[in-house]
Image: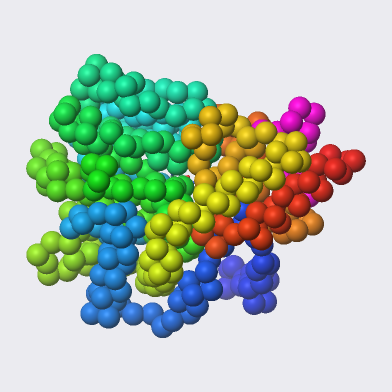
Amino acid sequence: MRVSAPASLEGPLVVPEKTLMGPGPSNAHPRVLEAQKLPLLGHLHPEFCKIMDECKDGIRYMFQTENRVTLALSSTGHGGMEAVMCNMLEPGDTILIANNGIWGERSADMARRHGAVVHELKEPAGSAFFLQSIRAALDVYKPCLLFVTHGESSTGVVQNLEGIGDACKEHGCLFAVDTVASLGGTPFLADEWGVDVVYTGSQKVLGAPPGTAPISLSDAAWQKVVNRKTPIRSFYFDLTWLANYWGCDEGPRKYHHTGPISGVYALREALAVSCAAGLESLWERHSRCARRLFAGLAEIGLRPFVETESFRLPTVTTVSVPDGVNWKAVIGYCMNTYKVEIAGGLGPTAGKVWRVGLMGVNATEERVDLVLRALREALAQASI
Ligand code: PMP
C-alpha cells in the first residue's frame, strides 16, 4: 500500500451545534435532519418518484405557481442561476440585468460566459430599482430576458417585483427572478407577478441542507427552451432532460443523473414544514422578527445599512459597522461566546456591514434577542 489510511478519519464525525444567523445556510428543522437518516432508494424507484412529485407540489406552493415545469436541481443556488443562463440564452441573445449587488455581478458574469450580450441597469448598494427605470431600460436595450434578484443578500435589499412582469410582456421579454435569499420570508407570487423563470436555494428559509435548488418555468419560458436553435451548452443543467427526470413531460422518466436521494428527502420535509406553516404566517413571522431586530439594533446604537425602510429585506439584515469598530472581532465574539454566526459583508458591502440572517427556524423572537445580546456584549468589549 503506497498511501496509508489517514489518521484524520479514524474517529467518528463530531460536529458542534451552532446557531446559523448569517445569510445562509440556516439551521434545519428537526424533521429535516431526521429525514436524512431514512434508507436510500434508487433514483428512479416509484417510491422516490412519488417523493419528487411531492416536492414539485411544495415548490409550486412556495413559488405560488401552477407551472408544469417545476423541479429541484441537484445543486446549490448558483446552479439555479447557471440553469437560467444556459437554458434561456443562446449566443448573441440580449439580457438585461438589474445589478445592485453581488448577485447582479455574478449573473452578468454567467450570462457573458454563455455568449449573451449583457446590459446592466445599476443601482448603488443598499438601493432598489423603480419600475420606471426598468421600463426605460427595456425600451433602450430590447432584451429577450430580464434578470432581477428579489432578495439581494449582499446588501440586504428586497426588490419590489410588482409591475415588472407586465412591462416585460409588453416588450416581448421573459422575466427571470432569483429568490434564493427571499423565498418564504417575504411575499413572492410567481404567476400573479408574471415571472417566467424563478429559482431558489434549499438552505435559507426552507431550512434544508444546501444541495437542492427549486426552479420553475412558465409556458413561455419553456417554449423558449424547447425552440432553441442551438443546443443547451450544459448537459447537467439541460432542463429538457431534467423536466423528463422530474416527471414534467409525458415521460417515461429516464436516467439523466443520480438524484441526491437524501437531499431530496430533506427538501421534501422542509417543504412540508413550510407548507404546514403557510406562506402568510411565514411572511408575517419573518417581517415581525426583522422589525424586532431593527428596533433592538437602534437601542444599541447600530444603524441599518439600507436607509429606505421599504427596501429592507426581512431575511437578511445589513447593519453598518460603526467607525473604529473591528467588525471581525465582533463576529468572533458572537461565535466564541454564543456559538452564533453572523457574517460580514460581501462584494460591495465587504468590510462595511454585518449581515444577520433571520430565516426559517431562526426567525423567532428568542433568536433575535440572542443575536442582539451577543452584539451588545461584543460592542462593549474593551478589546474590540
Ligand atoms: N442568489 C442569492 C440571492 C443568494 O443569497 C445566494 C447565496 N447566498 C445565491 C444566489 C447562491 O446560492 P448558493 O450559495 O446556494 O450557491
- Residue sitting at x 25%, y 74%: 49
- Can you tell which quarter of the image residue 64 is in? bottom left
Q: Nearest the camera: 81 or 310?
A: 310
- Please state, as top left, top right, bottom left or bottom right, where the N terminus lies in the image: bottom right
- Can you tell which quarter of the image residue 325 is in? top right
Position of residue 348 in the picture relative to residue 335 (left or right): left
- Across and down, in percent, residue 72 comes to 32, 59
Q: Visible in this render: residue 92?
A: no
- Residue sitting at x 41%, y 57%: 280
Q: Visible in this render: residue 255?
A: yes
Position of residue 7 in the picture relative to residue 258 (left or right): right
- Residue sitting at x 24%, y 57%: 70
Give the farthest residue toward the top. 140
- Across and down, in percent, residue 24 comes to 54, 52
Residue 160 among those drawn in magenta: no
Q: Nearest the camera: 156 or 251?
A: 156
Boundaries of the magenta span: 320-333
Give the total of numbered labels: 0
- Residue sitting at x 14%, y 48%: 219
- Across and down, in percent, residue 60 comes to 28, 59
Residue 324 among those drawn in magenta: yes
- Across and down, in percent, residue 339 comes to 72, 59
Give the farthest residue toward the right. 382
Position of residue 228 in the picture relative to residue 14 (left or right): left
